[in-house]
Image (cartoon, grey):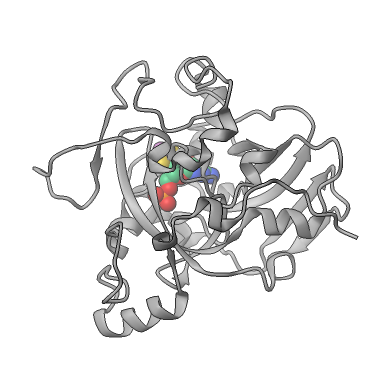
Amino acid sequence: MARRWTNDLTHDDVTPEGLWLNRRHILAGLGAAGLAGLPAAGRAQPLEPNSWDDITSYNNFYEFGTGKDDPVRNAGAMDTSGWQVTVDGLVDNPGTYDLAELIGGLETEERLYRFRCVEAWSMVVPWNGFELADLLDRVGVQEGARYVAFETAVIPEVMPGVRRGVLDFPYVEGLRLDEAMHPLTIMATGIYGRDIPNQNGAPMRLVVPWKYGFKSIKSIVRISLVEDQPPTSWNKANAREYGFYSNVNPNVDHPRWSQATERRIGGGLFAQRQETLMFNGYPEVAGLYEGMDLTEFF
Ligand SMILES: Nc1nc2c(c(=O)[nH]1)N[C@H]1C(S)=C(S)[C@@H](COP(=O)(O)O)O[C@H]1N2
Ligand SMILES: [Mo]
């Protein structure tokens, strides 16, 4: 029934082996090290993950307020039980699904990803989840679909940022279909082997590691396969500063600040800034943008 939308890449082509971590190893490691932030010992780690505390207490989730500590203080009031997700547009199997039904059996390995916010801070997060491509295959992408649009829940009773109208909600984001199908693009449902906390986008959020953090939309309730480039929240709020693509690119400054360096959260106040890497250190995605002027399509 569902047709596989194919591209040429496989994991082996694009995911450096060291970035894949076996969930069982992680859980075993946590048994020994606690939740302080160290994955299984004895493995060569190309990246040092941030601590659970860093990852879950310094957040952007404007529905719950604009301060970095607003989400951790306010998001607990959101009830994610019985979560439903609507899948519509150019798909074989449209409908409104219970989340468990929609994603049952898809969850796979833990992945350690760099995360880079447009505000020039960064983290490294060990996500649990699955490839967005596997979900799209399950719902069956139809001919003619060129983009995937995503939408976040709007629950004013528990979302002070929605009540104050700090952005035009619902928060919306989008990817080109080939970006969405790329094996680095995941739907996260956990961190460090635990359920993803509300402030990080429970029960399911997008993670696109080569793009600025705001592309990684949280608490998703709608996924639409569409023909035309969908609107995106930060582009709607300020088109001059935020484009559709939003690839991490040290050579394209944000109009109000440089993107050449970043501050790793948790490194301490006096930690040296580090150089920001093209595509946030995922050069394997460069082929997606071949022939595009990335200063025009920023
Ligand atoms: N629905 C929604 N998703 C969102 C945001 C938001 O305000 N609302 N903020 C974005 C921004 S700007 C960033 S940097 C990341 C932060 O993710 P984290 O809190 O898990 O680090 O979430 C992104 N996803
Ligand atoms: Mo961000």
Q: Is residue 52 above or below residue 92?
A: below
Q: Is residue 173 above or below residue 196?
A: above
Residue 151 seen in this snapshot: no
Residue 105 x %, y %: 68, 73
The image shows a total of numbered marks equal to 0
Residue 213 x %, y %: 44, 41
Residue 174 x %, y %: 63, 36
In the picture, measured across the screen, residue 257 lies left or right of residue 213, that is left
Quarter of the view holding residue 129: bottom right
Foreground of the two, 121 or 159? 121
Identified at 34% across, 57% down, the residue is 55
Residue 259 x %, y %: 32, 27
Quarter of the view holding residue 278: top left
Foreground of the two, 77 or 136? 136
Foreground of the two, 3 or 117? 3
Identified at 64% across, 44% down, the residue is 180
Identified at 39% across, 39% down, the residue is 280
Q: Is residue 205 above or below residue 284?
A: below
Q: Residue furthest left?
A: 270
Foreground of the two, 115 or 154? 115
In the picture, measured across the screen, residue 255 lies left or right of residue 130, that is left
Identified at 67% across, 68% down, the residue is 82
In the picture, measured across the screen, residue 30 lies left or right of residue 187, that is left
Residue 81 seen in this snapshot: yes
Quadrant in which the N terminus is drawn: bottom right
In the picture, measured across the screen, residue 26 lies left or right of residue 205, that is left
